[in-house]
Image: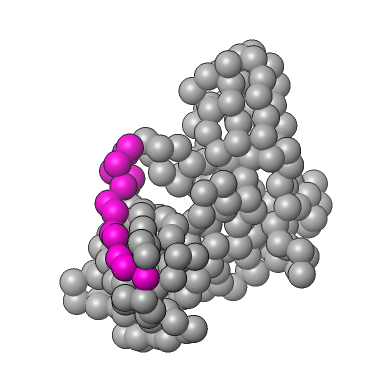
């Protein structure tokens, strides 16, 4: 996952709606995946992770889905709130400790 | 619990000067990572340490960049001499040594501006 440069994909949702952020990862042998949230002026914050032997994992208001067949990862946020506005990154790890970050998605929540 | 602590939060200096960024990982974490984030290239891994030993420095852009981890609770990233293209936000992250299946926890970064 390389950055697309200056322009991040943006998802705009209304407060209270559910959000779905998608990510395509690069290596079919990757065995661990993480979603991070980054707010302005802060570092990436861990949200939820999933291992390759799972298809779905749920947290508080968030669900991560993993489709290994098409190398696709998604983050679902239930009842999106203004505080959810941030840039969201998926990341994959292959055998080592190195995180490979995907292209970020900017989530904008409007009232 | 204290998270990853980085200092300074902001650094503005003139090109040619030496810059030193500092990081204190989460207590008990064995792995430490330095990243750089820019608008054009996103988050890039520069180097990482396991048990204070550098494991992979292939992301370090040039010889002007160096990193050390003298003990389990402290690491530095140094740029000498600095250049305007080094301007970026530099993040430090730490994790438990778990064969790669442990999340990395990030500090709030150092915003570096080289004039």
Left or right: residue A27 versus residue B87 is left
Q: Quadrant of the C terminus of chain B?
A: top right
Where is residue B106? Give x, y as percent: 60, 57
Seen from the viewer's position, the closer of residues B38 and B98 is: B38
Residue A28 against residue B87 in the figure, above or below: below
Seen from the viewer's position, the closer of residues B33 and B56 is: B33
> What residue is rendered at 63% in x and 50% in y?
B108
Where is residue B23? Give x, y as percent: 72, 47
Q: Which residue of the protein is positioned furthest toward the front in this rendering?
A: A111
Seen from the viewer's position, the closer of residues A34 and B39 is: B39
Q: Is residue B112 visible?
A: yes
| Magenta residues, start to end | A2-15
> What residue is rendered at 43% in x and 60% in y?
A85
Left or right: residue B88 versus residue B49 is left
Q: Quadrant of the N terminus of chain B?
A: bottom right
Residue B16 against residue A108 in the figure, above or below: above
Q: Give the prevailing secondary structure in the magenta stretch.
A: loop
Please tell me in which quadrant of the rendered image residue A109 appears. bottom left
> What residue is rendered at 73% in x and 52% in y?
B5
Magenta run includes residue A9: yes
Magenta run includes residue B10: no
Please tell me in which quadrant of the rendered image residue B39 appears. top left
> What residue is rendered at 18% in x and 72% in y?
A70
Where is residue A10? Give x, y as percent: 29, 54
Where is residue B8? Give x, y as percent: 73, 38
């Amino acid at each position: 996952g390389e950055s697309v440069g200056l322009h991040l994909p943006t998802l705009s949702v209304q407060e209270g709606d559910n959000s779905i952020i998608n990510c395509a990862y690069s290596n079919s042998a990757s065995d661990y995946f993480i979603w991070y949230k980054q707010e302005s002026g802060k570092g990436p914050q861990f949200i939820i992770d999933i291992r390759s032997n799972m298809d779905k994992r749920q947290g508080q208001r968030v669900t991560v889905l993993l489709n290994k067949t098409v190398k696709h990862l998604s983050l679902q946020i239930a009842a999106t709130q203004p505080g959810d506005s941030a840039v969201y990154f998926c990341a994959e790890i292959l055998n080592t400790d190195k995180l490979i970050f995907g292209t970020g998605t900017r989530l904008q929540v409007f009232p | 619990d204290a998270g990853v602590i980085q200092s300074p939060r902001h650094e503005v200096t003139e090109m040619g000067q030496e810059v030193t960024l500092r990081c204190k990982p989460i207590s008990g974490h064995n792995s430490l990572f330095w990243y750089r984030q820019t608008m054009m290239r996103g988050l890039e891994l520069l180097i990482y340490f396991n048990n204070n030993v550098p494991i992979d420095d292939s992301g370090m852009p040039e010889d002007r960049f160096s990193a050390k981890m003298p003990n389990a609770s402290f690491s530095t990233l140094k740029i000498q001499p600095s250049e305007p293209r080094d301007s970026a936000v530099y993040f430090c992250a730490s994790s438990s040594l778990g064969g790669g299946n442990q999340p990395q926890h990030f500090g709030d970064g150092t915003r570096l501006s080289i004039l």
